[in-house]
Image (cartoon, helix red, strand yellow):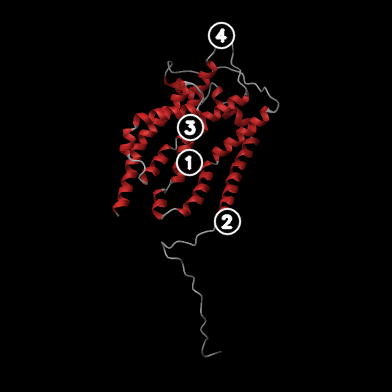
Amino acid sequence: MALFKKKTKTKEIVKPKEGVEEKEMSFIEHLEELRWHIVRILASIAFFGILTFVFRTFVFDKIIFGPRNPDFLTYQFFCSLSSATCFGPVDFELIAIQMGEQFFTAIKVSFWIGLIISFPYVFYEIWKFIKPGLYKKERNAARGIVFSCSFLFMLGVLFGYFVIAPFAINFLIGFDIGEASASPSLSSYVNYMTLFTVPTGILFQLPIFVYFFSIIGLITPELMKKYRRHAFIIILIIAAVTTPPDVITQFLVGVPVYFLYEFSIHISRRAAKKYQESLDE
């Protein structure tokens, strides 16, 4: 046994100090990373879309055609309030007027439902790609953004499905001219159901946009209060563009979004306070 042991040098693993920026990625590396984010997003949408297509009978009977059923949750809720507010679905027949319409409609529904279900993961992948390019203060300001955006989007979709859809369908189908009877096509019905839900989910992102514009100083609560009336008109115009061309549906979308605008004023006030504190530091 040797009396003296030879000392060996061990390579230390030096961790980067906090606040030191990592090596910037090249343009090709950014494209490669973006490609994998897109692949994962498409895979998520495809997974839930295929699952929807497999169970398309249940999806169409219970979800897509839900507002046509008398036991729909919205009708039960209003009927439970009083007989004066009780109403039910208008009876109408759906027809397929083109060859392959049922198949392609099922594909379309599968895509949209796949996108809606996977929206939290889709936004998470987008945020994961954007986050490394932000400063620490910006990342801290955006804490919880994935949950907030996902919650507001799902809230908007549910509002469109349970509130806008039954009222709009009853109004549009119940509106008659002379002896003409409404027999909408399956594709037309699905397109309207999409307009009732997905755009509403996007419009419900208003508080998020207001928060970020306020935290960088582009929007102030005073500015939002000053142009409150103008905002109401703009909201109605946006609702008119993103919804079917009837006044009832436009107000069903526009009024809640305006309430979100008023709520966003309080959010802007808090964000503006953070922006002022960052300037004072």
Residue 217 is situated, as x and y percent measured from the top left of the image, at 35, 45
Labels 2, 1: front one = 2
Say which element carries label 2.
helix
| Circle 2 Cα neighbour tier, 10 Å, few/some/many (<14 / 14–19 / ≥20) | few
Q: Earlier in the sequence, mark 1 or mark 3?
A: 1
| Vertical position of residue 121 compared to residue 11: above or below | above
Labels 4, 2: front one = 2
Residue 70 is situated, as x and y percent measured from the top left of the image, at 54, 21
Q: Earlier in the sequence, mark 3 or mark 4?
A: 4
Residue situated in front as seen by the camera: 220 or 83 = 220
Cα distance in 3D space between marks 3 and 2: 37 Å
Using the rendered view, name the quadrant where residue 185 is placed.
top right
Left or right: residue 210 compared with residue 115: left
Residue at image coords 51%, 31%: 197
Give the labeled residue for mark 1. 150
Give the labeled residue for mark 4. 178
Give the labeled residue for mark 3. 200
